[in-house]
Image: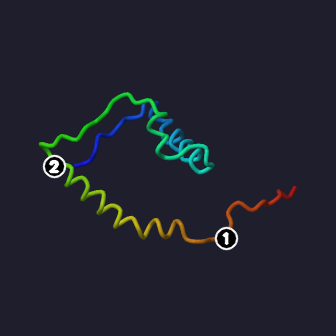
Amino acid sequence: MCAAWRSAATPTRSRSTSRAGWIGSVGTGQLTFADIPGLMRTDRVLTPDPMHPAVYDETFAVHQELHKRLAPVYRRLNHPRPSLTKFHPRRH
């Protein structure tokens, strides 16, 4: 059974941005992943219901299947390719 999950108290649209900020802070050495939970505000704590393990098992199996089926797509998207960010001056 999983541990409690904390829902971040941020607007939905900015959640991915704030998570990227936390990861960037870890990447630059300003924080560790262990620091982040103490810095986040949470609006609720969700605790798995031990009476429904079959629901969690089923949804986890779906996630595993998705991961397996999407792996080739991710490989295609992440393969090395020519730089897409080269500067090409406009010709007038």
Residue 16: image tag = none
Question: Farthest residue toward the left?
Answer: 51
Residue designated by label 1: 82
**Proximity of marks 1 and 2: CB atoms separated by less than 8 Å:** no
The residue that disc 2 covers is 53
Q: Quadrant of the C terminus?
A: bottom right
Given the image, on which type of amino acid does mark 1 rest?
Pro
Q: Nearer the viewer, residue 50 or 12?
A: 50
Question: Which residue corresponds to the image point at 39% horizontal and 64% vertical from the top-left?
Answer: 70
Give the structural element (helix, strand or loop) at label 2. helix
Question: Is 87 above or below relative to 25?
Answer: below
Tally of numbered discs: 2
Residue 24 in the figure: left or right of residue 76:
right
Q: Residue furthest right?
A: 92
The residue depicted at 48 percent of the width and 69 percent of the height is: 75
- Element at label 1: loop
Q: Residues within 10 Å of mark 1 (few under 14, many from 20)?
A: few
- Where is residue 85 drawn, in percent x and y? 71, 60
Instruction: Answer with the quarter of the image where residue 37 lies.
Output: top left
First-in-chain label (1 vs 2)? 2
Left or right, 80 with reference to 43: right
In the depicted structure, whether residue 37 falls above or below residue 75: above
- Residue 46 locus on image (x, y percent): 28, 36
Q: Nearer the viewer, residue 72 or 46?
A: 46
x then y, percent, for residue 84: 67, 63
Amino acid identity at mark 2:
Pro
Q: How is the image coloured?
A: rainbow
